[in-house]
Each structure stands twice: as C-alpha cells, then as structure tokens.
C-alpha cells in the first residue's frame, strides 16, 4: 500500500472516531466536500486536527487550518503526508 493510501485510510478512521460519525467510509472517500456531507464546522476541524496530530504524531501548524485543506479526505491526506515528510527531513 502506498504512503498516501495508508494515510487516507488512517485519516478516514480518525474522522469517524473523533467526530463520532455514523457515515460509511465509502461516502467519506467519495465526498468532494466534507462540510456538505456532514456539516464540518470549526469545532469539527479542531477535533479532527487533534485526532490527526495524535494519530500521525505530527503538529498541524495554524496556517493549515483552512477550508481548502480540510475540504475532503484527499486534501487532508496530502497535507498530512507533507507534514510527515517535513518532520522526517527535520523541517
């Protein structure tokens, strides 16, 4: 499994677990916009950030707290991967 596929799977689990959603993972994967799927608000983003930081042992910087990054599972996974790679490279 590629890095990004593994990260997407883990992000899906964090979303379901931390936001206590009763949504199928398939629906989360297909969603173009999480806010349209389940009304993702600022509290949900904070809960998701905490879950991502714990799951991936990274720190999500304030500049990442945008609607664009938390638009869907793909955008979240891409930015998590970038943070992981930055951590590995000492950034």
Image (cartoon, grey):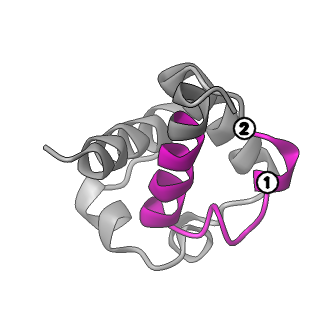
Can you see residue 53?
yes
Q: Quadrant of the C terminus?
A: top right
Q: Secondary structure at mark 2?
A: loop
Mark 1 nearby-residue class (10 Å; few <14, some 14–19, many ≥20): some
> Which residue lies at the image location 78% right of the left edge and 63% below the top edge?
66
Q: Quadrant of the N terminus?
A: top left
Q: Is residue 52 above or below residue 3?
A: above
Q: Is residue 89 above or below residue 29?
A: above
Q: Secondary structure at mark 1?
A: loop
Q: Is residue 80 magenta?
A: yes
Q: Count how many numbered circles sit on residues in the image.
A: 2
Tell me where residue 69 appears, x and y as whole percent: 65, 63
Q: Is residue 88 above or below residue 30?
A: above
**Which residue has dot 1 on it?**
65
Q: Quadrant of residue 28?
A: bottom left
**Which residue has dot 2 on it?**
60
Can you see residue 19?
no
Tell me where residue 84 appears, x and y as whole percent: 52, 35
> Which residue lies at the image location 45% right of the left edge and 53% below the top edge?
77
- Image position of 2 (left or right of 57): left
Q: Are marks 1 and 2 in contact (CB under 8 Å)?
A: yes
Q: Which residues are magenta?
A: 61-84
Disc number for residue 34: none
Tell me where residue 70 appears, x and y as whole percent: 63, 61
**Which callout, 1 or 2, points at the residue further toward the start of the chain?**
2
Distance of mark 1 from mark 2, alpha carbons?
Answer: 8 Å
Tell me where residue 30 appears, x and y as whole percent: 32, 73
Mark 2 nearby-residue class (10 Å; few <14, some 14–19, many ≥20): some
> Which residue lies at the image location 54% right of the left edge and 48% below the top edge?
82
Q: Residue furthest front?
A: 89
For the stretch drawn in magenta, the main secondary structure is: helix
Q: Residue furthest right?
A: 62
């Amino acid at each position: 499994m590629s890095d990004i596929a593994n990260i997407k799977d883990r992000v899906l689990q964090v979303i379901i677990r931390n936001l206590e959603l009763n949504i199928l993972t398939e629906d989360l994967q297909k969603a173009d916009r999480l806010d349209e799927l389940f009304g993702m608000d600022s509290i949900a983003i904070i809960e998701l950030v905490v879950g991502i930081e714990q799951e991936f042992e990274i720190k999500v910087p304030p500049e990442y707290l945008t609607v664009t990054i938390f638009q869907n599972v793909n955008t979240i996974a891409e930015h998590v991967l970038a943070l992981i790679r930055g951590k590995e490279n000492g950034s």
